[in-house]
Structure formats: C-alpha cells, structure tokens
Image (spheres, rainbow, N blue to C red):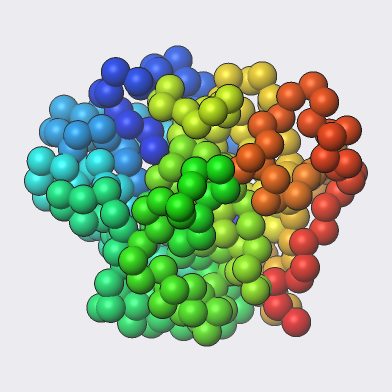
C-alpha cells in the first residue's frame, strides 16, 4: 500500500511554480500510488479559475484513488461551495480492504484558524470503527504545533479533543498541512505527518518544496520525504510497525532507507552538507510499535 500525501498547492497565486507541479505529477505518475491524499489549500483565494487549475492537475495523476479536503485558503470568497462542486464533499471517506481514510474539513470561512467541531468527532469515530485496517485521519490544520513557528500558531481550537479521539479510536496516521513545513512526530500510538508545500515558493526559512510518500508493507510503515526540486532527493526519514492484525499490502518492493533522523529535529534543522554529522543520525531509526 502506497500513499502520496500532498498539501498547500496554492494554485494560481504569484508564489505558484508550474515546474514544481510538473515534477510532482511526473513522480506520482511514475510510482502510481494506491491513493493520493491532499490536505487542503489547493487554491490561494478560493476562486473558480484556481479550482479549475487544481482539478485539472489532480485529474492527470495516475493514482488509484484521490481524497482531498479543503484548507483555510480554499474557503475564502465562498470557495467552500466551489470545493463541493469540484470534489463532491468537504468530508470525504475512502475505504478498501486494508485502509480507511476519514477526511475532515477543519476550515472556517473568514478565518485562518482551524476547528474540527463536535459533530465531526462522532463522525470520525464511526468512520474508523473498523478492525484489521490501517486508520487514517486527513485534515488541513495540524493538531500538534510545528517547531520553529512560535506560539503553536493555528492549531485547531479543539485539537485536544481530537487528540484524545485519536488515542481512543486507535487512529494510526494523521495527515495534515497548513504551515508549509514537514513534520513527523509520534504521540502515544499515533503518527502525525505534516506535509510541506509541494508547488509554492511560500516556504519557511531554508526549507524546500516537498511532499510525503507513505508505504505500508509487511507490517512496516515507511515515511519518505520527496524534495520536488531534486536537490535532496527522496529520503526515508522514519519507519514504524503497524498494529498486529492490520492488513498491509505486499505487492511493493521493500524500501531500504539510506538514513533517517529524529522526527522532531526537522522542524528546526534544515538539511545541509553537515546535517547528518551534526545530528548524529543513525542508519535506521525505529519508531516505537504503533500498537502492542
């Protein structure tokens, strides 16, 4: 099972880079993931022409399934209505024999702040109340603060309730975006994966445009970061065990990580020629098992 995680494409803004979009499409069309999850901010201002460009881009991707949720930029200028016209719903769900993905609209019109909402909590719990499958929650706003950005900016107001739900419902992966900086972190038995921006020059510090590739194979979850410019390449930065009894795909070849580093470090330490020596990076970083 291979999941591509994109976020913050920001089509049609002055920061958008079409060459990076072409590189993202080429990578996805070459690897052909089972599902591509887009965690919001497909547009810059929620305009119809921006949605058309984003939809055309996503339509060309050779991916088994596609799931997208809106971000705070997408609901500007009544863009939430346009999102539904393009994608059918702002609360999408994908389920197959091995995976269930619950999409949540955490945006609020007229605000950049996030909110999941009490009604969504019960919907999430019901959606992921399955056994023997990997459980994924996808939303735009990150539930855990991204290091280096200060004051935990724009974590949803009810993030503590959602975090408790993640533990109680045994959610394995939480995918988010919003602040244009990748982060991989484990809290309890849930892995929180925040994607950077893949196609926008609205970058934090010296970071680079990127997206995530998550491979679930033979009881192991591999998390890779792809540098869209090619400068850092595709590197495996974390791995973890799946819960016992969770169905996992076996058709993909085993990924051998050349190196990995502590997940929390990436928010404040930008890779450079000395990053591996400075952080004392091990060859393979084993995260604690997801369950049991």
Give the x, y percent position of residue 133. 58, 73
Q: Would residue 105 appear left or right of 191 to someone viewing this image?
A: left
Q: How many marks?
A: 0
Q: Would residue 15 appear left or right of 214 to someone viewing this image?
A: left
Give the x, y percent position of residue 17. 40, 18
Viewer-proximal residue among 265 and 116: 265
> Residue reaching furthest front?
151
Q: Is residue 31 above or below residue 15?
A: below
**In which quadrant will I find the N terminus?**
bottom right
Residue displayed at 47% across by 20% down: 20
Q: Is residue 109 above or below residue 204?
A: below
Residue 184 visible to the viewer: yes
Give the x, y percent position of residue 78. 9, 46
Residue displayed at 19% across by 34% down: 45
Residue displayed at 56% across by 53% down: 193
Give the x, y percent position of residue 129. 46, 83
């Amino acid at each position: 099972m291979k999941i591509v995680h994109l976020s913050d494409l920001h089509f049609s803004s002055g920061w958008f880079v079409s060459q990076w979009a072409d590189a993202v499409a080429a990578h996805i069309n070459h690897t052909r993931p089972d599902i591509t999850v887009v965690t919001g901010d497909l547009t810059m201002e929620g305009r119809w022409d921006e949605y058309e460009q984003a939809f055309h881009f996503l339509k060309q991707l050779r991916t088994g399934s596609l799931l997208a949720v809106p971000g705070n930029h997408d609901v500007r200028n009544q863009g939430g209505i346009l999102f539904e016209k393009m994608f059918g719903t702002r609360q999408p769900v994908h389920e197959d024999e091995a995976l269930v993905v619950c999409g949540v609209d955490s945006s609020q019109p007229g605000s950049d702040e996030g909110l999941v909402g009490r009604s969504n909590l019960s919907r999430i719990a019901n959606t992921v109340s399955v056994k023997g499958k990997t459980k994924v929650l996808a939303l735009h706003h990150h539930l855990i603060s991204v290091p280096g950005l200060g004051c935990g900016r724009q974590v949803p107001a009810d993030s503590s309730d959602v975090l408790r739900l993640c533990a109680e419902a045994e959610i394995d992966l939480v995918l988010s975006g919003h602040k244009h900086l990748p982060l991989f972190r484990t809290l309890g038995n849930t892995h929180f994966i925040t994607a950077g921006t893949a196609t926008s020059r609205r970058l934090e510090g010296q970071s680079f445009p990127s997206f995530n590739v998550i491979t679930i194979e033979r009881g192991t979850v591999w998390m890779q970061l792809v540098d869209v410019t090619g400068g850092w390449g595709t590197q495996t930065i974390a791995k973890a065990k799946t819960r016992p009894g969770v169905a996992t795909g076996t058709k993909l070849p085993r990924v051998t990580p050349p190196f990995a580093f502590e997940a929390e470090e990436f928010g404040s330490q930008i890779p450079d020629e000395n990053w591996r020596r400075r952080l004392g990076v091990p060859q393979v970083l084993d995260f604690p098992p997801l369950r049991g």
